[in-house]
Amino acid sequence: MKNFIPFQNAQTNNDASFYSPGKSPVIQPTASVHPLAVVTGNVHLGKRVTVAPAASIRGYEGQPVWVGNDVKIQDCVVLHALDAYYHQEFVEETLVEVAGEFYGAYIDDRVSLTHQCQVHGPASIGADTFVGMQSLIFKAIVGKNCIIEPKALIMGVEIGDGRYVPAGALITTQAAANQLPFVNYSDHFTSLSRSVAKADNESATVYPKEIQQRLRIA
């Protein structure tokens, strides 16, 4: 796909030994990036993605950064990754593999990244997963349909589909990840998380209309 930069706050990579230079964000026309957010370098934003104020999506060290369709990135979210290149060559150990392709960070469709959470690659998050406020995901793979409550730390592990991570949990061993319970859809916090995700999806139909015209480059 040809690089497409429809927003004034989307920036191209500069030249450096630790990344491939000249990469620009590819942003689908139905995506929305707030004027106070920044998208830099080798980043893909899918259809109907919403990026809220003060979010930072950086695809110049760890790259590419892939954000699928209908993803909601709330205020002050950081999406970044470790160096993917050394003297213009891929360093695979700093990347995550998804469907045979390598990424610095990969966010699948319909994921909700809520306020101040951080996803630092190599990392991937499966479809329909909710990531709570101020959580940190680093060097980890999170499956689809998971719920991660606020201030959880997930590092160096793989979490299976449909798992529930309690608020404040420290998941830094695979044994701890394997013991996580499955999502209980009758639980209060689960219902709250799903409500937030639903509100995110509904707001996406209004948010772009309010700001896209101000962001387009003539």
Image: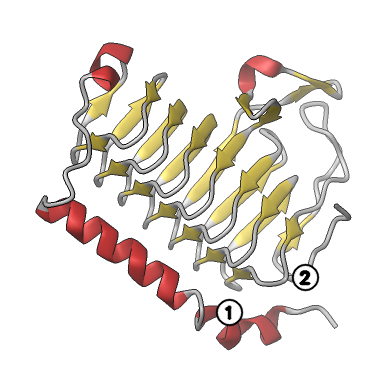
Where is residue 96, by image quadrant? top right
Instruction: Measure the alpha-carbon separation of dots 2 and 1.
Output: 13 Å
Q: Which residue is mark 2?
A: 6
Q: Say which of 118 and 98 sits in front.
A: 98
User: Which corner quadrant holds the C terminus?
Assistant: bottom right
Residue shown at 11%/50% (left/top)?
187
Does residue 38 appear in this view? yes
Check whether the beta carbons of the residues at disc 2 and disc 1 lie within 8 A of each other: no
Residue at the location (82% across, 26% down)?
17
Can you say whether 197 is above or below 7 in the image?
above
* Residue 54, image x, y percentages: 50, 63
Residue 32 image offset from top left, x and y in percent: 61, 71
Q: Which mark is residue 153?
A: none
Q: Is residue 96 above or below residue 134?
A: above
Residue 138, horizontal then vertical, whole percent: 45, 29
- The total number of labels drawn is 2
Element assignment for label 1: helix
Sequence-earlier tag: 2 or 1: 2
- Residue to which mark 1 is pinned: 208
Foreground residue among 22 and 25 = 25
Q: Give left or right: position of 31 versus 133.
A: right
Residue at image location 74% in from the left, 71% down from the top: 8
Check disc 1 and give the amino acid type.
Pro
Circle 2 SS class = loop
